[in-house]
Amino acid sequence: MASVCIQDKRAFMEDVKNIIESLLFVSSDPLSVDQLKKLLPEAETLEIRRALEALEQEHRQKNGGFVLHEVAGGYQFRTRPEYKQWIERLFEPQPTRLSRAAMETLAIVAYHQPVLRSEIEHIRGVNSGNTIRILLEKKLIRVLGRREIPGRPLVYGTTKKFLEIFDLKDLKDLPAPQEINPGQDKNNT
């Protein structure tokens, strides 16, 4: 009787893994463990995590055209970087082009969020309204709410799309400022 239960459990785990693989394959956005749990209420969170680990390992060992990648607080199938040139031929992508002003503003939002427009402009030294609008349109930043101060100004932060584009699991993966500008420390010593 116990062997039947164990076999049923193995079959269930294999089904969970295959269901998760299917869901990840059709989703255009990364899926978090919580989202998968809502889609698979009959599976335990631990079973979902184990299935994700198994899928990640299988695709890494298979060394095929894509891998399971943890990004933006979830999991997503991504093509292997070594095949980028052929994929670009297929899609002829228009890369997200950002001006220097947009990159500066995006970096300020990423490192100082939640941040006000006035704080961004104080750091940059110039009006940043148009640049913020562009970043909002590109869905790289979003309005988090309003600060409870006179005028109730908007508060900005980065989005999941920002994490996806810059291939970050979360904001903790941002490089330290010293890593970005290593020469900065040499002048101080």
Image (cartoon, rainbow, N blue to C red):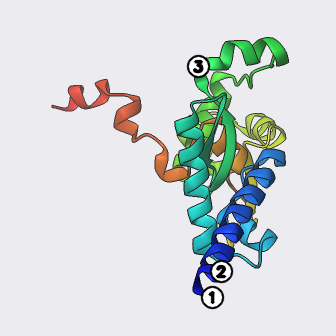
Quarter of the view holding residue 80: top right
Instruction: Kindly check if marks 2 and 1 are in contact, taking CB atoms under 8 A apart as contact.
Output: yes
Rendered image: mark on residue 4: 2
Q: Of label 1 and label 3, which has the lower sequence position?
A: 1
Q: Which residue is mark 3?
A: 82
- Residue 99 location in percent, x, y? 69, 22
- Residue 40 location in percent, x, y? 77, 71
Q: Which residue is mark 1?
A: 1
Rendered image: mark on residue 34: none
Closest to the camera, between mark 3 and mark 2, is 2
Please name the amino acid that badge 3 sits on. Answer: Glu
- Residue 162 location in percent, x, y? 67, 42
Q: Give the vertical position of 43 relative to 87 (above or below).
A: below
> Taking the image as drawn, is residue 81 in sight?
yes
**x 58%, y 65%: residue:** 49
Q: Secondary structure at mark 2?
A: helix
Instruction: Kindly check if marks 1 and 3 are in contact, taking CB atoms under 8 A apart as contact.
Output: no
Badge 3 density bin: few <14, some 14–19, many ≥20, Cα 10 Å: few
Q: Secondary structure at mark 3?
A: helix
